[in-house]
Image (tube, grey):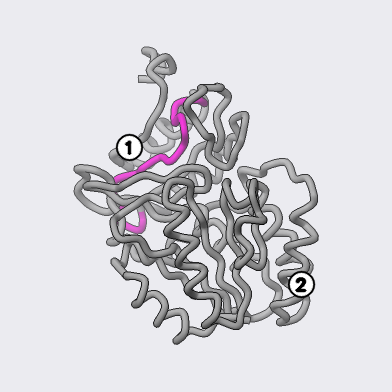
Amino acid sequence: MKILILNLPYSQKIIRRYSCSYHAVGFLYPPVELLRIATIIEQNFTFPLEIKFIDAIAQNNDKQHCLREILSINPDIIISLLSVDFINFEYEFIKTIRPKFDGKIICIGYLPSRFPSEFDKIDLILGNNFESVFLNACKKLHDNDAAKFLSDLNFYKAQHFEFDPDIFDYINYSIVNHNDYQEFLCRGKTAFTYFSFGCPFHCSFCIKTYDLNRAYFRNKENILKELQGFYHSGYKNIRVMDDNCTLNKDVLSAISTFLHEKNIQFNFYGLTRVDLINNEII
């Protein structure tokens, strides 16, 4: 089976996320949700599989170039992410692909999962439980059958799954070129990671990543192993992708102790709430 995981093209640099999107000026982050799916598929398929990953945003591929790549690869399945702000453009591109492509199209996104009848050119739409859906479908599949894989995904789509922040140890970033991504005003290689997912606050202006209504914390040991791997791979900067990167002071303390003991130095970047900053956190 040949699977293409595609970060769809757009006329400008944007960050495309499950439940939000925004323009990227002076910085660019990888399509983390798509990288997480690629990692899950790689680690859980039980037979040989060919995965192609195209980030049309990072590679400045326009619609025509991207369409030529799709037809050249001729995958059995395309997996893409649809955003909120740019969804009309994205779905127009899906409709352009549809008559030229015989395989299956799977899309993940907040709006399509709410209004699936508006997106009838997509074979399968997944909501915020997409990681567990892919994990279970990959484990169940025992032959190289794209139609069966789609059927299994559709079956698990209807199941309830509690979000698992440790569905794998850490993302396989070797799938992409690190030079394509950067944090604002950073020098040197930048790695991207999470300490936690979701948010316990209920701000009226925010659509939460993955539509998670509480914080889920990664296993501390996985975070430390990942940071050591980043160090050995020559990364100088760490962009923490959490909604609030200072939610768990025990994790921050463990990271600080670990880096001191290993004589490792990083520049850390992230977002948090002002009311989560105190002397202990600093």
Q: Which residue is mark 2?
A: 141
Percent across and percent down for residue 197 are 55, 37
* Earlier-in-chain disc, 1 versus 2: 2
Query: Disc 2 on helix, strand or loop?
Result: loop
Q: For mark 2, does the 10 Å Cα neighbourhood hold few (<14), some (14 to 19), or many (20 or more) residues?
A: some
Which residue position holds label 1? Answer: 268
What span is in magenta? Answer: 232-248
Question: Position of 269 compared to 275: left or right?
Answer: left
Q: Which type of secondary structure does the marked residue at label 1 adopt?
A: strand
Q: Nearer the viewer, mark 1 or mark 2?
A: 2
**Is 262 contained in the magenta span?**
no
Residue at horizontal 51 percent and vertical 22 percent from the top: 203
Decide whether the magenta segment is chiefly helix, strand or loop.
loop
Look at 46% across and 64% down and name the residue there: 92
Disc 2 marks which amino acid? Leu
> Front-most of 86 and 72?
86
Q: Is residue 58 left or right of residue 146?
A: left
